[in-house]
Amino acid sequence: SQQGEEDPQALSIQEGENATMNCSYKTSINNLQWYRQNSGRGLVHLILIRSNEREKHSGRLRVTLDTSKKSSSLLITASRAADTASYFCATVRGMNTGFQKLVFGTGTRLLVSP
Amino acid sequence: EAGVAQSPRYKIIEKRQSVAFWCNPISGHATLYWYQQILGQGPKLLIQFQNNGVVDDSQLPKDRFSAERLKGVDSTLKIQPAKLEDSAVYLCASSSPGGAAKNIQYFGAGTRLSVL
């Protein structure tokens, strides 16, 4: 089952604008990650935020996490055409085996036009 | 460092036929994952290996899907017989054994399966 629901499903912006994607989830988590998937390719890890963190930055990426609302957001600043891709949030929680499981959301398709 | 290798990239088969996918993870990565990604959806975990042992196969349709990782390195995923609803991209991923890095998965480019 898919843990995360992303909003919006699709987003179209111009180069230079900021893009914000939201993710909501249902159960408690150890951490939350964002991945990017270019068309026809595998997923690439972007950033990880732990359950005790509220905000994290990496280059033009800013991620926030609100565990009380079970939600996260990904902000891409000064977007470029190369940012065109699908973005997925993935929640990580422990299993009784001692291992951790990544559960992906439904994704946001971002189109950045020149 | 070489990435996760998958083959073939594309496969077209008719329903009720069999198909197999191959994955070679990043060297030294003990954990290997197979995901199914249906068009327009996020990846869904089918099976997770730690070395050559299965950690989680709760979402693997065991009546038709099987996977193995005999020597704890390469892995194959098989579908026999295929159904129309198996049309999807099959992604393989691997992760490092310990520390913070174990949370991060590295994905191959995937195999796009079309069942006609």
Image (cartoon, coloured by chain):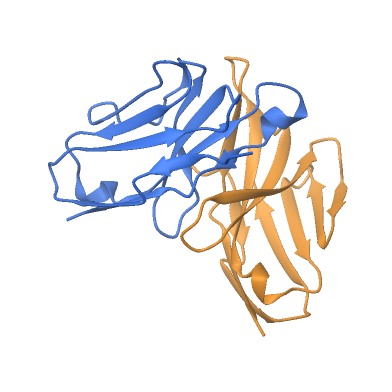
Viewer-proximal residue, A74 or B26?
B26
Residue B36 in percent (x, y) is at 41, 43
Residue A8 in percent (x, y) is at 61, 67
In the rendered image, the quadrant that contains the N terminus of chain B is top right
Viewer-proximal residue, B3 or B41?
B3
Q: Colour of chain B?
A: blue
A15 horizontally vs A60: left or right: left
Q: How many marks?
A: 0
Residue A9 in percent (x, y) is at 56, 66
Q: Colour of chain A?
A: orange
A102 horizontally vs A19: left or right: left
In the rendered image, the quadrant that contains the C terminus of chain B is bottom left
Vertical order, A58 against A90 (above or below): below
B10 horizontally vs B54: left or right: left
Please tell me which residue is depicted at 52% across the width and 39% down the height of the picture.
B4
Viewer-proximal residue, B16 or A104?
B16
In the image, farthest residue toward the front? B1
B56 horizontally vs A95: left or right: left
